[in-house]
Image (tube, helix red, strand yellow):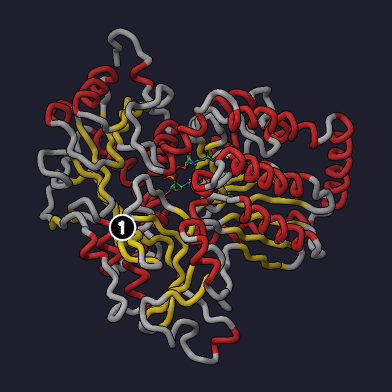
Amino acid sequence: MRILLLTRSFNSLTQRLFVELAARGHEVSVEFDIADSVTEEAARLFAPDVIVAPFMKRAIPEIVWRNHVCLVVHPGPMGDRGPSALDWAILDGAHEWGVTVLQAEAEMDAGPVWASVNFPLRAASKSSLYRNEVTDAAVTAVLVALERVQSGTYVPRRVAGRARPLMQQDARRIDWARDDTDTVLRKIRAADGAPGVRDELFGESCYLFDAGEVTPSPASAGEGRGEGVAAAPGAIVARSGDGILRATRDGAVRIGHCKHVDQDDAFKLPVALAFPAQHAALPESAAKGDDIRYEEHGVVGVLHFSFYNGAMSTAQCERLLAAYEQALARPTRALVLAGGPDFFSNGIHLNAIEAAASPADESMRNIEAIDDVCRAIIEATDRLTVAALQGNAGAGGCFLAFACDEVWARCGVLLNPHYKNMGNLYGSEYWTYTLPRRVKHGAPRAVMEHRLPVGASQAQSIGLIDAVIDADRASFMEAVIARAQSLTNDASFASRIAAKRERRARDEADKPLARYREEELERMRRNFYGFDPSYHYARAHFVRKVPHAWTPRHLAVHRELSGPRSK
Ligand code: COA
C-alpha cells in the first residue's frame, strides 16, 4: 500500500512505524503536521491508499479525512478520548492501558475503531511507556488495522467514549504536605518527558522531571523509611549524583532534571547544571545514584549505564570509563555493555553542551570523553565485548555500540547510525574505523548519508549489528547473558580472542587508532569552531524543541515525485 505518515514530528513511534511498514513492502512517505494546506498538498501529491497519523496534536483537515481513510493512533484503550491519555492513566494509577487505531472524523478520537491492543501499565514515566508498551501495541494495532482496510470487507466499530480534558498543571500540582511518595512519583512520571510538573526549586519556579524512588542506604535503612523522613515534606535534603533528594511526607524522592519556568529560552537540564551553586552546597546523599551499575554472572560481566534520555555528558563519560576499567580488572571472559532500559545511548549530551559557557569547547570535551570510552572498548583485546541494545541508539550512541566485538539488539529496537541530522556533524567515536569493518559491501558512506532510522532486523541484514534477540523487555538481558555465557564456553573461544588480539595489532600497525581519531576530530573542530554554524543552530533548536518549519526532504518522498503517479 502507499501509506502517508502524517505526524507532528518524526518521533520514536513514527520512526518505528516507518521502519515496520517499509519492511513489509509498503511505500511510505512522511509529512509533518504543520498547516492544513501542507497536509492537503501532501495527500494530493502522494495519493496515498491510507493515511496513518501516529502523533497528532490537531485535527486532520476535513477535506483530507473525507477523501482518504485516515487512521489515527490514540494512546488509550477503546473508548478513551482526549489529548492527555497516558498522563491520566499514570496519574490515576491504572493497571491496564491500551492503544486504539480509529478513523479520523470531525470529533477528535471519536471515529469508528479499526483495531485496539491492551497492555499492563508499568510503574514508569510517560515517555518510557510511550517508547516501549505504547509503541509495540501501536505497531500491532496499525498492522491489524491496515489488514482490515485492505480486506475491503471489515466494518470498523463505533464505541461509546469518554473524553478527558487536556491535563493542566492544577491536576499535576504536588501537595507536598499531603501527597505520599507514590503520589509524587506518579505526578512527575505522568508529566515526563513533557511538560513536567510545575513546582519550586531553591525558591525558583521550575518544571520537575526524572523522578526516582530512593533506596535507603545501608546506613539509613535502620531508621525505617530512609533519608528525608525527618525533614519537612518538600524540603531538599541532599544531592545525589546530578540530582537532588526531596523529602516527602513518608520518605523521599530523587529528582534528576528540571527546567526554569521564568527564564526565556530555558530548556531541560540536570539539577546540578540548572542550580550549580545550590546543588554543590547540599550534603551528599548516602543513597547513591545508580545510573552506572556492574554485575557478574559467572564469567560474564555486565555494565549498565542508564543515563536520562541516553545523553552522555563529559562527566558521565568519565564515570563510565572509570567503571569500565574497573570491570576490565575483573577476571571475566566477556563484558556486556548494557546501556539503559530505554536507550542504549544517544551520544554526547546536547543539553549540557548548550548550557556551557562555551558550547564549542564543551562539545570538544564531550566528544573526547566519549572517544576515550570507545577507545578503551576497542583496545580490550583480552575478552569479548558485547553491546546489548535494550533500547534505541542514536548518533554517537550507535557508534559507541559498534566499538564492541558484537552488537545484539532486542527486536523492535531502532538505530539512527548517522550524525548529519545534527547540523551536518561529521561524527567521531572512531566510526571511520568501526563502520567499514561492519558494513561489508563497501557502503559505510551510504549508512552515514542515509539519515533514516534502521530497525534491528534491517541493521542485522546490512551487517551493522550481529544479532536480533526476540525477547521482551523483561527477558532480554537474561537472553543476552545466556548467549554470552555460551560463547565464552565454546571450544573456539580462546582462539577467537587470540585472533581478535592479532587483528587489533595488525590494524594498529596499518593505521593507529590515534590517527583515526585525529582525522575525525579535525572535521569535528570545523563543525564546532568553523565558519558554518549549522551544528550550533541545530543543537539550540533541538534542546528547545523548536518545531520543524517543513518536512525534511529525505522523509517527504512525495515532494521528490514529479508529475501524476499511477497507483
Ligand atoms: N543529548 C541530550 N538530549 C537528548 C539527546 C542528546 N544527545 N538525544 C536525545 N535527547 C533527548 C531529547 O531531547 C528528548 O528529550 P525530552 O525527554 O525532553 O523530550 C529525549 O531525549 C528523547 O528524544 P527524542 O528525540 O524525543 O527521541 P526519539 O526516539 O524520537 O529520537 C533520536 C531519537 C536519537 C533520533 C533523536 O533524539 C536525536 O536526533 N538525538 C540527537 C542525537 C545526536 O545528534 N547526538 C549528538 C551527536 S553524537
Asked whether 238 or 144 is in front, the reply is 238
Q: Nearer the viewer, residue 419 or 546?
A: 546
**In the image, is the residue at mark 1 within 8 Å of ligand 1 by its beta carbon?**
no
User: What quarter of the picture does the C terminus occupy?
Assistant: top left
Residue 510: x %, y % from top left:
86, 29
Q: Is residue 57 left or right of residue 229?
A: left
- Residue 320 is left or right of residue 561, and the answer is right
Counting other residues with Cα less than 10 Å from the Cα at mark 1, is it few (<14), some (14-19), or many (20 or more)? some
Q: Which quarter of the picture shows residue 28?
A: top left
Across and down, in percent, residue 544 comes to 39, 43
Which residue: 55% across, 53% down?
A: 390
Q: Position of residue 332 (x, y in %)?
A: 79, 62
**In this orientation, does residue 466 appear?**
no
In percent of the image, x 54 and y 61: which residue is there?
475
Determine the secondary structure under disc 1.
strand
- Total number of numbered discs in the rendering: 1
- Relative side of 260 to 304, left or right: left
**Image quadrant in which the N terminus is located:** top left
Residue displayed at 42% across by 84% down: 231
Q: Nearer the viewer, residue 121 or 304?
A: 304
Amino acid type, label 1: Asn
Instruction: Determine the residue positioned at 34% across, 68% down.
Output: 186
Query: Would you identify the image quadrant in which residue 170 lies?
Result: bottom left
The vertical placement of 193 against 400, above or below, is below
Q: Which residue is mark 1?
A: 118
Residue 278 in picture, x, y percent from top left: 49, 66
- Whether residue 272 can be seen here: yes
